[in-house]
Image (cartoon, grey):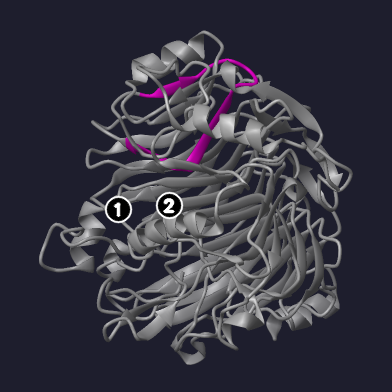
Amino acid sequence: MFRRPHARHGTTRRAVTLGLTVATIAATVASTSASAGPPDRTGKTDLGPQVTIFHPGMPVSQIQASLDAVHANQVDNEMGRQRYAFLFLPGSYGTAAQPLHIKVGYYTEIAGLGAAPTDVVINGKIEAYNRCLTEGGTANCIALVNFWRTLSNLSLRVDATGQDECRSSANFWAVSQAVSMRRVDVSGGGLSLMDYCTAGPQYASGGFIADSRLPATTNGSQQQWLTRNSEVESWSNAVWNQVFAGVVGAPDDAAFPDPPYTTLETTPLRREKPYLFVDAKGNYQVRVPAVQRDSRGISWGDGMTPGRTIPIRDFFVATPADPVHVINSQLARGRHLLLTPGVYDIGRSIAVRRPDTVVLGIGHATLTARHGAVPLDVAGVPGVVVAGVTIDAGERESPVLLRVGAKHGRSASTARNPITLSDVYFRVGGPHIGRTDIALEINSDHVLIDHTWVWRADHGVEGFTEGVNGDTDRWHTNTGRYGVVVNGDHVTATGLFVEHFQRYNTVWNGEHGRTVLYQNELPYDPPSQADWMNGDSPGWAGYKVGDHVRHHTLHGGGVYVFNQNDPSIRTRNGFEVPIRPGVRLHHIMTVNLSAGAIDHVVNGVGEAADMTRVGSPVYLVEYPAANDADRVRALN
């Protein structure tokens, strides 16, 4: 994401009504919040100390105080180990006299526990604001580093009572990568994806919304965004790359790139993220949505999202204190896995081998590699779902952080029941030095990647670079060669964000691959052109489709350059693909953020994104050009 320099980081850039009684809810909360002696975590509803469960009988002031305290701790805690989930039992929260105003900081999940989003109603606001990062927190106000937060499965009735004129003008969700909004119904006021109430420059670089009903939405400064399978009253504007798939009310894209909208009538492959809910008897369940093809609109308009329900007793509910061998034993017995909030040190792989296993993290549960381990290893079997998990590289190099399917093994995943990754994020460095060869490796056929951020960190805590030469040191110590490598066939990605890796950020070797929105920044920190060479060619493309591939489709892609160490560094192409009739790129672009150059958009076609056009994207409508008109538009 494009970040301007600042002191701290030194970088740029329908409803199912459950009808729970207050007594039932209170009993549920009691059983969830307390235990006498060691809990049985193979079937418990104790979700641990970092999970707070609210019920509608609680005073608004008590709920507000709990949320405010954690936000005060997390608003600047970008590299910390604290993780939180706030879950709301079915009912209504906040009143006209006392609306509930929630601010969401780092590593925080806000979610409803209803069977449908309309079962939990928040009267108030749920917001993320810019962070002001210089001059004592009054200047350089941006959302470019507002990462790692989650909002899902509730209705928001916007009420700005008590806020000033500017803040009362919208519900602000100023966020960037690794942030998802899913299954949210917003009404009563507008939604803004930028925070225009603080000082400038107010940049933002998100983001992702799915399965939601939205009011009039202001995109504002958001450089790129994917909205999938939703309903929107209106959408205001765009910056560089705005993609809509299966969205009722989405803007038309016929004038691309002015504005730069990319609109697909339907989403080719969809499985919504699993979610926790409480049934009418007060029992915790996990709903696993069904696979849909060529879908449009929300999944919950007629009630509960189609799919299957798994009782919580069928999950092993893990905490960071649980050794991997215990987790693997439970998985081998056929249990699913729920990872409660926290940082898990993983010295050997968590191995998912059984079909239809669900691995669900809440509160941004984080797996950190130790001793060069592969933290998560998923067999190429049908129906595995991994969701809500962040995976960190450790200081000893791992070959890969998440492997799906054996590299030379047989894939058993099927088109009817694909393996699915939802809101799975990767980080190489930041809170500590990280090293990996590959972050995400997909060897299995029939995989759906539904929103991921794969990040080799461009900033971190003090000592992050292990040296005195800043970003030059980081190039040699914080290493990640490839972000995403796809070797399997029939892999679909909806929302693929990959940044800063030292060779190809994404390599796609499988046949019949599809990507709906790709966002990439090339690495900021090559020390020199000699460090950024692919053989005799200057640099590595941000998106590479293997030379042997015959069928591949990309809708809405962008590659950005910012060579802060040496502005003379060049990259030949933003995209590299084989020239074949079955390989098609729709609506792609490159942009210079203020240093370096990308000579061409794809395969030697397209003007240079260089220092003569900083911040002005170079667009191609189609590659290869579909007709003479597209050729002219491409050249202009």
The disc labelled 2 sits on which kind of residue? Tyr
Q: In this view, does 289 lie to the left or right of 240?
A: right
Q: Is residue 327 rendered to the left or right of residue 180?
A: left
Q: In which quarter of the image is residue 193?
A: bottom right
Quadrant (top left, top right, bottom left, bottom right) of the C terminus:
bottom right
Out of 574 and 145, give the one closest to the viewer: 145
364 sits left or right of 533 in the view: right
Magenta residues, dominant SS class: strand
The location of residue 11, given as percent across then percent down, is 32, 74
Characterize the local packing of mark 1: few (<14), some (14-19) or many (20 or more) Cα atoms within 10 angstroms: some
> Does 47 appear above or below 218?
above
In terms of depth relative to the viewer, which is nearer, 529 or 18? 18
Asked if residue 298 lies in the magenta stretch, the reply is no
* Residue 145: image location, x then y, percent: 42, 67
Kindly report the distance in space between the C-alpha atoms of the residues bearing marks 1 and 2. 9 Å
Asked if one can make out residue 354 in the rendered structure from this viewpoint, the answer is yes
Where residue 588 sits in the image (x, y, percent)? 66, 68
Residue 2 percent coordinates (x, y): 45, 74
Give the numbered dot on residue 434: none
The relative height of residue 623 versus residue 359 in the rendered view (above or below) is: below
Magenta span covers which residues? 349-368
565 w.r.t. 509: above or below:
below
Circle on res. 107: 2
